[in-house]
Amino acid sequence: MTSADDWANSETLTTRPETDLANLVLLGGDATDDDEIELGDATCIGGDYNGTGAACGTGWSDVNGDGAVDILDLVMVGTNYDLEYSPWIP
Ligand SMILES: [Ca+2]
Ligand SMILES: [Ca+2]
């Protein structure tokens, strides 16, 4: 429960502090978690096709995280094939 006293020492912020974000790397289709989208990723996904996800080294075959290993995961590999990273640029 709040009261007027709870806000007695409050102050409205007119500016917000800036926050530096770490570099983000977004890789769609890197099932093997080696920062490269290549044949091994497609092989991993193919090996668990119609499954719910399986380890591929330190990666995971369900690359889009929807709980199913299917064509959508392979599409991610195909879309980003031969890429090494995909830096996020705000
Ligand atoms: Ca990979
Ligand atoms: Ca999936």
Image: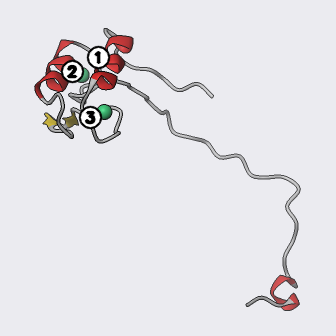
Pointer 3 residue? 62
Query: Residue visible at 19% across and 12% down?
Result: 39
Q: How far apart are labels 2 and 3 at the CA level?
A: 10 Å
Where residue 87 sits: x, y (%)? 48, 23
Query: Residue visible at 43% across and 29% down?
Result: 25
Where residue 90 sits: x, y (%)? 63, 28
Residue 20 versus residue 43 in the image, above or below: below
Q: Tag 3, which secondary structure?
A: loop
Check whether the beta carbons of the residues at disc 3 and disc 1 lie within 8 A of each other.
no
Where residue 52 sits: x, y (%)? 21, 40
Where residue 74 sits: x, y (%)? 28, 19
Check whether the beta carbons of the residues at disc 2 and disc 1 lie within 8 A of each other.
yes
Give the mark, 2 or 3, whose residue is nearer the N terminus: 2
Residue at disc 3, CB closer than 8 Å to ligand 2: yes
Give the mark, 3 or 1, whose residue is nearer the N terminus: 1
Pointer 2 residue? 41
Residue at disc 1, CB closer than 8 Å to ligand 1: yes
Disc nearest the viewer among 2 and 3:
3
Query: Residue visible at 24% across and 28% down?
Result: 31
Residue at disc 2, CB closer than 8 Å to ligand 1: yes
Residue 68 versus residue 72 in the image, above or below: below
Q: Within 10 angstroms of label 3, few (less than 14), some, or many (20 or more) residues?
A: many
Q: Is residue 68 left or right of residue 28?
A: left
Q: Tag 2, which secondary structure?
A: helix
Pointer 1 residue? 37
The tag on residue 29 is none
Q: What's under tag 1, amino acid-wise? A: Ile
